[in-house]
Image (spheres, helix red, strand yellow):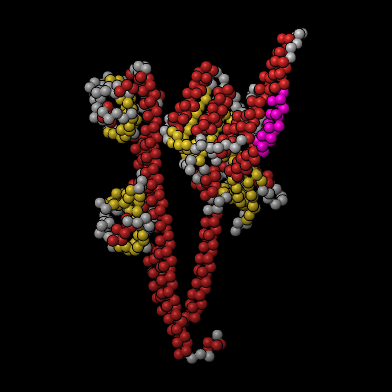
Amino acid sequence: MNFLNTLQPKVIIAVALIVGALMVVSAFIELKQSKGEILHLLTEQSSSLIETVNQSSINALNSSEEIEYLIAERLFNNARLIKKLDSLNLLTQQKLFEIGRENSLFRINIFNQNGMRVLSSRIPEEDHPHGEENINRSEELEPILKDGLKEFVIGLKQAEFTDGQRFAVAIARSNKRGAIVINLDAEEFLEFRKRIGLGKIIRDISDNQGIEYIVLQDSLGILAAGSSVDTISSIVSDPFLVSAINSDKIYSRTHIYKNQEIFESVKRLNYDGEVIGIFRIGLTLDEVRAVEDRMVRRLIIISLVLAAIGVIILSIIFTTQNLKTVSNEFKKFKTFTSTVLENMGEAVIVVDEQMQITLFNKSSKNLFKRRDEDIIQKNLSELSDDISRSLLEYCKNSGEQCADVAIDTAIGDERKYLLLNFTRNKDEDGKENFIIVINDLTESRRLEEESKRKEKLSAMGELASGVAHEIRNPINAIGMIAQRLDKEFKVEKDSEEYHSITSLLRSEVTRINKIITQFLSYAKPLSLQIKKINAKAFFDDIYRLFSDQAKIKGVELIVLSDQSFDMKIDPELIKQSMMNLVQNAIDAVEKKGKVEINYFRKGNDLNIEIADNGKGIPENVRNKIFDLYYTSKPEGTGLGLSIVQKIIAEHNGTIEVFSEINTYTKFKITIPQT
């Protein structure tokens, strides 16, 4: 203060003016920077929002199609059953009524080759104004009656005598006698589609604060929009929108809408390779205007008090800027930390002192197949009893440092091998919480066991090859000696017993030679002859090979899939594997048991499943069944499943076994098709 007192008033005024000018310039610069930052945040926010709306729209369209497909498939399954009953002349109106009631079907109609209805599940009410006579659907059923289609989806159609809508499919009757049509009341389906449809998504999101409008439009006009939108500029009249509809990029701009400046982002919506239109999302610039208003007020205040407190204001500005910088850095750090946690490859769960879940990252959602909104603030035991017990035992109730622990637990229908890392922590309020980092080692463990099993089988195969060669020569010599003894030596006493013993000796030598040949066959490297063959024909052939045997034993043999697609395999070796597995399944079930064969494509993999409802495989035996020479059959050689696994491994595939005692056994084979 003494230094300031020595200055002349003119100097003080000059300094104040300079400081004021600097502050004014600084305020304008800060205004520009703040506006730029807010626009940048708006760009990121709108980009994220438009991507979310875009993906949600695609998901809604996919969901609608998938639901319609599942409904159609369900109706087709019922129609195929009715077709079989129809071919056996077992259908009556009462039978159709019972099938419809049991399967929640609205109507089942049988039509002849001329399109006339000859039978229906409807039992007319006495006072119903519409009869059942002279119902003709020849035009609707033309694809079957004239074009020769086996089945097709009629889809949604208006009910003839009511305001409701129906969803229908049609299937050809056997021997070209007409068609079978099954109707389902579509009210629930349509209501569900409304709840997940594009319009619903757009209206719900556009009602959020800060969003001026969300519009989906094409070159002809508005396809869907929020409730506040009645008109909007067309695409062809705006070069910016023309550029957006011709590109997959997100375009952003400031734009005048209803005499108000807004921030708009635009992105093209593609579905099934076609351009549906463009999404336009308008966000308010209230924050930018608020910043501008604040800066104007600040300038007014500065001009009023500049002469008296210029230096103080300057110091306050510097302090404010430093505080803002620190705050921004803290926010960035917090955002960065949250992003890292959310996108970690490991599942991360944070629980408080009461074991309530407070954080559940993306990997946790994928691992447990649960949404964070369904699990946040729930007790950890509701997610997993095993993890909850491990946390209590190895960390929360332990006076020592938290320990890592590996557990084998069930998540849904799957068994998982998890490595748990526990960390004790305290938040800013001093309250204790626990961070659980979960590594899913299931696949690594499976691959490790698969590798060990392959190494073991390879070593055992080499050993078998060596031993087989060493045994075969003396065994052949013994066989030749037995043959000579039988032919060249004559005994006068007990001749019949003598020949019986030499014959038995030669028979056993032959049996040993057969086993040695199998050993050598296993040890010999396989030479794959990969061919492209039809899956349906292949598995139909497997069914024919075992159908008679299954009937004789009283076992129900079923091929669940009838998909027809090409698969790339060595047909002879895979056929050998299938015969071994199906034979084992038939042997494992009692009379009236069931053996199921299923095959399907999943991604780039061919999946084959052989299941039975027999006695099952004990858990302590499952890890041994693929070992060389291990068998539970009195006459078995212990080579069958070992050879199956070797064939699958040569196809770069995997074979897994799932079983429950006295319930079921299922072998699952996965073979890459790339």
- Asked if residue 136 is among those painted magenta in the image, a careful observer would answer no
Front position in the image: 481 or 204: 481
Residue for point 34% across, 63% down: 254
Left/right of residue 430 with respect to residue 324 in the rendered view:
right
Residue 112 to residue 68: above or below = above
Residue for point 54% across, 27% down: 579
Q: Which residues are magenta?
A: 459-479
Residue for point 47% across, 23% down: 544
Give the x, y percent position of residue 547: 49, 21
Give the x, y percent position of residue 645: 59, 35
- Asked if residue 464 is among those painted magenta in the image, a careful observer would answer yes
> For the view shown, which residue lies furthest in the top direction?
493
Main SS category, magenta section: helix
Left/right of residue 378 with respect to residue 212 in the rendered view:
right
> For the view shown, which residue lies furthest in the right direction?
493
Front position in the image: 520 or 77: 520
Left/right of residue 254 with respect to residue 449 in the rendered view:
left
Q: Quadrant of residue 591?
A: top right
Left/right of residue 626 with respect to residue 320 in the rendered view:
right
Give the x, y percent position of residue 127: 26, 21
Image quarter where the N terminus lies is bottom right
Front position in the image: 518 or 608: 518
